[in-house]
Image (cartoon, rainbow, N blue to C red):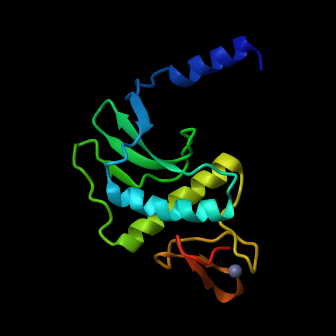
Amino acid sequence: MSDAYSSSLEIRLSDGPGAPPGPEVLTGPLEPDEQPRLWAALALVNADLAATRPDRAPLELRRYDWSDGGRQIKVATADGESYGPAVWQRGWSGDAAELLADPLELLALVADAAQQTVLESGRQVWPLCPAHALGLHASGVAGSWHCSAGGGHVVAPVGGPARG
Ligand SMILES: [Zn+2]
């Protein structure tokens, strides 16, 4: 792709006819003392990542602040790439969403977001079931990685000692 082509493409994407200018977003790392429950959940997921994918840097929490008042927190790579759903957000009306009250549900949400970020940023299915070599999921069986193969089975608690 030539420079001329890529710059004209950018203009079309950002200044399409009739498209109102969107709100601007400022993003950066979430401070370590903000949302300690999210950091605690991510620490468990990062323990699994370190045990099974030592080549990958620990995941981080990142904030996205929109100029119109919205804020989201997402799980991101150390390079700032994020693909999963927001694990917390504040609505555009300014209403702050509460974190999920159930710590296991919150852990499953963070684990799912981490999993999608690992998948999309490295094209790696993670974590894998050691018995079936299929991707595990943390939602559905709160607090544990589970595999849907063989009728479904729990593989390990998120952040637990038995890791695939
Ligand atoms: Zn399995």
User: Residue 27: x, y in percent?
Assistant: 43, 34
Residue 92 at x, y = what percent?
28, 41
Q: Quadrant of the N terminus?
A: top right
User: With 94 as the anchor, is 38 left or right in this view?
Assistant: right
Indicate the position of residue 160 as horizontal and vertical percent values. Answer: 54, 75
Q: Position of residue 119 (x, y in %)?
A: 65, 54
Up/down of 3 relative to 30, above or below: above
**Which part of the image, by quadrant, shows the C terminus?**
bottom right
Ligand 1 lies in quarter: bottom right
Q: Residue at x 76, y 73 (%)?
A: 133
| Residue at point 40%, 39% (across, down) | 64
> Does residue 126 sit above or below 75 in this rendering?
below
Residue sitting at 71 percent across and 16 percent down? 5
Q: Residue furthest top?
A: 4
Whether residue 16 is visible here, answered yes or no, is: no
Res 37 visible: yes
Figure label count = 0
Q: Is residue 41 rendered to the left or right of residue 97?
A: right
